Image (cartoon, rainbow, N blue to C red):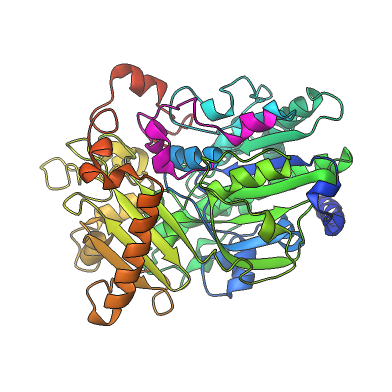
Amino acid sequence: MKRLFLLFVAACWGGLTALSLPAAETKRPNILFVFADDWGRYASIYSEINGPGGINDVVRTPNFDHIAREGVLFRNAHVNAPSCTPCRSSLLSGQYFWRTGRGSILRGAVWDEKIPSYPLLLKDAGYHIGKSYKVWGPGTPADAPYGGQKYAYQKAGGRFNNFSENVSALVAQGKDIEAAKQEMYHEVLGNFRDFLSAREADAPFCFWFGPTNVHRSWKQGSGKALWHIDPDTLEGKMPPFLPDVPEVREDLADYFGEIQALDTMLGLLIEDLTKRGELENTLIVISGDHGAPGFPHGKCNLYDFGTGVSLAIAGPGVKGGRVVDDFVNLPDLAPTFLEAGGVAVPEVMTGRSLWPVLKSDKSGLVDENRTWVVTGRERHVENARADYMPYPQRAIHTADHLLIINFKPDRYPMGDPYRLDSSDPPTYEEIRDETRATLPDEDSGPTKAWLVGQRNSPEWKAHFEWVYGKRPRVELYDLKKDPHQTKNVAEDPAYAQVKAGLEKRLLDELQRTGDPRLVEDGKFFETPPMSGPLNDAEGKRGAGRKKGAGKVE
């Protein structure tokens, strides 16, 4: 059965090679956007194009890989902010996150309805829009840039969002693993079919599939138990900021298991579109909202492990079979979707449509102006620091260098080390299961719990201080010599000219686009409601917790 399904999917993808007519010469395309919570640049095809020896050797994503091969695979896609709500605010609005008001923070976010968002613009132009699961949040109103819950299709169920926990529970009750997985898939397909059934005849659709299973938490050991991912195959492949120890390797294998569940679901959505005869007129876009949660240098960091994401696009108008090196910020997707639907792009959008790249027949660097992107962050968890202040950062990424400005280097980047020096330090279980136990801007999980537990050991003390300690105002990394960003060369005289040039380019872009961080020492972000404690109503409205996980988004 499994072999027949894989052959069927391969046959489906063979049809994508014909999807190369310019969008303007066909009817308006459907848009299927798969946007997975906390999924960074982890897919097996990246091992293929970048060479073996890294962690992508271990993960298996055949359906994403098919999209990438038949369409365009982006090697240098980055989120604008490695935190759920500001990332999604920027993507939906097509603007840098700092231009979205209270949408530029995580906890305490409020959406400004005056900001145009691409889904509602497509709806006004005649598209049938809908979503399943997470679009924008935590924040209020929930999923506001997608029309709130008015366009939600999720009554068939949402157990997929806690995939490993739910499948493991069914297996413990005696159900076969594959049968248990099918229960999760069936609910997602039910929601998608409900959405398609509600469409008026001949109307193009725009559907957002936003699973949160890749977001913590996961069932510990599920990568091996459910997907046969042996953690030991990661030994010797870990980047230097991830301790190459059994506990961390198992945690990463569990994360990869959730990615493989996402990839399987992607294949089933494609199968459904194929059976309906919709595949050839559907633009398929797959990405995620930042790097891995609960790991050093990942989510909430401006290193590539935190901001780099997978991105593949295939469908009508896309000249496929290419790998491109152009730097992409995910806000670029909003004008891309609008142009696909024949909708005028609002002048306020700072994102740039990807259609010149998608319609090109070139590989490598297609657009000579796409050689850098800017990323940043402000507040994630509101009480990450005792004074309720954010950790403001901005960065510029190029092919050769990464430069980061830490505007408040006196603050702890991952949050205060709560209780670590007290007479009652948090236990391993607390740190594993509750994000707010300590260092709250890094999600809880086994890796965090293990490393914090090793903070005073001779072998790991320096490593703990490296990833959780305070950082200098400027960080500069030479990516050709140091691809994992481990050696800050900002104070090396040999890099003085590079540092000055990148810092000027970064600050010029922030100034050009009206970043409040540059005004009055960031007063906008440093005063309530952008900082300070949440009131009770905000805390309840914007909780944004993954059901059953007890985690901050």
Q: Which quadrant of the structure image shows residue 493? A: bottom left
Return the x and y of residue 214 as percentages of the image width and height: 53, 45
- Residue 400 on the magenta span: no
Residue at (46, 42) in percent of width and height: 216
Quick check: 139 left or right of 166? left
- Residue 122 on the magenta span: yes
**Which is nearer the eye, 88 or 134?**
88
Residue at (25, 35) in percent of width and height: 383
Quadrant containing the C terminus in the rendered view: top left
Return the x and y of residue 259 as percentages of the image width and height: 59, 50
Provide the residue span drawn in magenta.
94-123
Q: In this view, does 152 lie above or below 212?
A: above
Residue 246 visible at all? no
Return the x and y of residue 128 as percentages of the image width and height: 74, 28
Residue 27 visible at all? yes
Return the x and y of residue 32 as percentages of the image width and height: 71, 41
**Which is nearer the eye, 166 or 80?**
80
Q: Is residue 398 above or below residue 440?
A: below
The furthest residue to the top = 537
Quick check: 517 left or right of 347? left
The furthest residue to the left = 423
**Which is nearer the eye, 191 or 515?**
515
Quick check: 419 left or right of 481? left
**Which is nearer the eye, 147 or 453?**
147
Q: In this view, does 232 lie above or below 181?
A: below
Residue at (81, 29) in percent of width and height: 203
How many numbered circles are shown? 0
